[in-house]
Amino acid sequence: MADAALEGENPPEYVGLVHEAVLRMQFGGRKVARAQLEHLLSLSERPPIRLLVIPFAAGTFPGAGNTVNYLEASVPQLDTVQVDNSHGPEFLGGAAQLAKYRAHLDWMERMALSPEASRDFIRDIANSL
């Protein structure tokens, strides 16, 4: 379903912020990890997708260790944040909560590599496997 949305006529912008640690995990072994990285590279070439890597060198940042999805609606009052934690997903929609997570994600985006540098970074990891 997500693929269909990103391949439609007017696909929404998708920004993925991925920490270097995630890219270096080898669940399933080297061959599987390399295939996953190559798939990410392929996806990152699509116009609506910006995949940004936060390298270890960036240091710590707010929200480290959490999975956060910020869903922007055409009407800002409908924006929603989904935070995954050990108890399952939590959905947030209060103005203060949205502002907090928007600020965290903006900070993470500033710490991340550019889309081009991120692709090179992912490619280097894939080639090392």
Image (cartoon, helix red, strand yellow):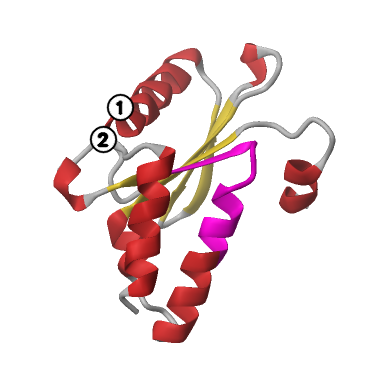
Q: Residue at x 33, y 67 (%)?
A: 125
The relative height of residue 105 versus residue 76 in the rendered view (above or below) is: below
Q: Residue at x 38, y 47 (%)?
A: 118
Q: Residue at x 52, y 75 (%)?
A: 35
| First of labels 1, 2 by sequence position | 2
Q: Please name which of the two marks, 1 or 2, marks the residue nearer to the observer.
A: 1
Secondary-structure class at tag 2: loop
Q: Tell me if residue 89 is in the magenta stretch.
A: no
Q: Is residue 128 left or right of residue 97?
A: left
Q: Is residue 17 left or right of residue 82?
A: left
Question: How many numbered marks, from 0 up?
Answer: 2
Taking depth in this image into account, of 6 and 92 the one nearest to the observer is: 6
Query: What amino acid type should be assigned to the residue bearing mark 1?
Result: Trp
Q: Is residue 50 left or right of residue 128?
A: right
Q: Tell me if residue 47 is in the magenta stretch.
A: yes
Q: Residue at x 30, y 51 (%)?
A: 65
Q: Position of residue 58 (x, y in %)?
A: 18, 41
Q: Residues within 10 Å of mark 2 (few under 14, many from 20)?
A: few
Query: Are the residues tagged 1 and 2 within 8 Å (C-beta)?
Result: yes
Farthest residue toward the right? 9
The relative height of residue 57 versus residue 104 in the rendered view (above or below) is: below
Q: Residues within 10 Å of mark 1 (few under 14, many from 20)?
A: few
Identify residue for label 2. 62
Taking depth in this image into account, of 120 and 101 the one nearest to the observer is: 120
* Image quadrant in which you'd find residue 12: top right
Taking depth in this image into account, of 77 and 115 the one nearest to the observer is: 115
Query: What amino acid type should be assigned to the residue bearing mark 2?
Result: Pro
Disc number for residue 107: 1
* Image quadrant in which you'd find residue 29: bottom left
* Image quadrant in which you'd find residue 28: bottom left
Q: Position of residue 70 (x, y in %)?
A: 53, 32
Magenta highlight range: 39-52
